[in-house]
Amino acid sequence: MRGSANRTHLGGNAVSETIISADIVDKDNAAREADLKRDYGSLGERLDRRGIAIDSIRDKVEKFAVAIPSWGVGTGGTRFARFPGAGEPRDIFDKIEDCAVIRQLTQATPTVSLHIPWDKADPNRLKQAASRFGLGFDAMNSNTFSDARDQELSYKFGSLSNADAATRRQAVEHNLECIEIGKTLGSKALTVWIGDGSNFPGQVNFAKAFERYLDAMKEIYAGLPDDWKLFTEHKMYEPAFYSTVVQDWGTNYIIAKELGDKAFCLVDLGHHAPNVNIEMIVSRLIQFKKLGGFHFNDSKYGDDDLDAGSIDPYRLFLVFNELVDAELSGAEGFDPAHMLDQSHNVTDPIESLMLSAVEVQRAYAQALLVDRKALEGYQDANDALMATQTLKAAYRTDVEPILAMARLNTGGAIDPVAAYRAAGYRAKVAAERPAVAGGSGGIV
């Protein structure tokens, strides 16, 4: 689709190229706008009885954004097999075009998060490609959990915690390279996730491995520009199944404290054991000023990387209840980054990412509806039933008219998936991008 874009408004006064014709979006919106206005008016009346101005919620939703992971627009897989989808992006420039479609239709995803070396290209060319569509760049992501094609030393037995000093040095230099690329792109953060760990008892010395990791991370931290943040990410298992070096939020908090004021904890919703109280972890990290941000997804059994809100939307709401509470109370240092991180095995990745962005916005809007004064009163009175019902009252509210009106006001699509399918984007790129052979394994 390169060279076939048109120009249209993408919210505000900025004019950027778009992939999907504005006429298609406008036609689809025109067929839905009257119903949307009626639904929005009806919801506004009901919220007004609760002392809530619907336009104020819509305004906040319009400003809320979540980053798209570059790797998310490709078809994912499992450890056993991967079944490629039609029109998969061939390179980072195709990925940027796919991300531009998501941004155009949802108006909720203004930035892209790159993964190096998967997305390695001339930084100036990357910046130019993204700016065509009004896209910016979110946190840079390093990769020392798999081996690059021309890599000298293998990470089979670990990277930043490897017993071999030369391998650790290679991993450190890779992260420093990611920072340099990000500086050109305008990124302001580096996310470090490692797969280091062990598969057998006795395979590694826990304390020595963690000490090596901390020493390596201190070198990376020293290379951060003054206005950057360092996000470290915990995960309880996979690819190491007996022990993992950064296995939980407690270890992650220790790392952030050891490194310094620019180091923060990243919370991936899938990186916890089933039924773990993630919202309480979020509260703790906010309280001690170490919440860096999120990778939003959902899970049923483990780190499933399912679409955000597809399994447990109430949990997503409860996480945002803590975030909104911190936002409204003016919590010191509170400025979390938001990003999707998912693997789409049986759906069109663009459709899944659009709906996931909407689900994250939905949880945010619902959390804004919580009667916090009443909730605090019930909490202080130890009225457990009414406290939880106060949360449920906000969660049960259908905020879809608010989300759709926010999209319409900012130049997006009232129904992003419908507009996307009407445009026939997937069929068009499938005709231009060579089919990818199946049969391989791997998550991405």
Image (cartoon, helix red, strand yellow):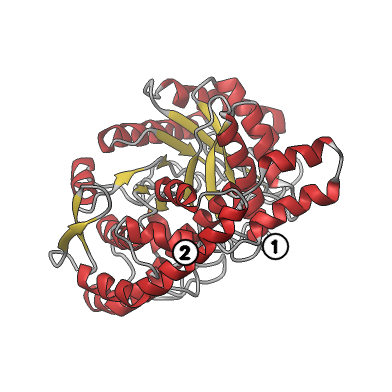
Question: In the rendered image, which residue does mark 2 sit on?
Answer: 40
Give the class, few, some or many, for how many residues have Cα within 10 Å of label 2's Cα (few <14, many ≥20): many
In the image: residue 190, left or right of residue 49:
left
Q: CA distance from mark 2 to mark 1?
A: 37 Å
Q: Quadrant of the N terminus?
A: bottom left
Q: Is residue 232 visible?
A: yes
Q: Position of residue 439 (x, y in %)?
A: 46, 75
Q: Residue at x 39, y 62 (%)?
A: 73
Residue 140 higher or lower than 286, as above or below: below
The quadrant in which residue 214 appears is top right
Tell me the tag on residue 323. Answer: none
Q: Position of residue 302 (x, y in %)?
A: 67, 58
Q: Toward the viewer: 401 or 153?
A: 401
Which marked residue is nearer to the observer: mark 2 or mark 1? Answer: 2
Q: Are marks 2 and 1 in contact (CB under 8 Å)?
A: no
Q: Toward the viewer: 268 or 410?
A: 410
Q: Is residue 163 visible?
A: no
In the image: residue 298, left or right of residue 117:
right
Amino acid type indicated by mark 1:
Tyr
Residue 261 higher or lower than 296, as above or below: above
Helix, strand or loop at disc 1? loop
Q: Residue furthest right?
A: 382
Q: Position of residue 26 (x, y in %)?
A: 26, 70
Q: Position of residue 358 (x, y in %)?
A: 47, 60
Tell me the tag on residue 301. Answer: 1
Q: Toward the viewer: 108 or 238?
A: 108
Q: Toward the viewer: 164 or 367?
A: 367
Counting residues from the start of the chain, the first of labels 2 and 1 encountered is 2
Helix, strand or loop at disc 2? helix
Q: Residue at x 36, y 71 (%)?
A: 33
Amino acid type indicated by mark 2:
Tyr
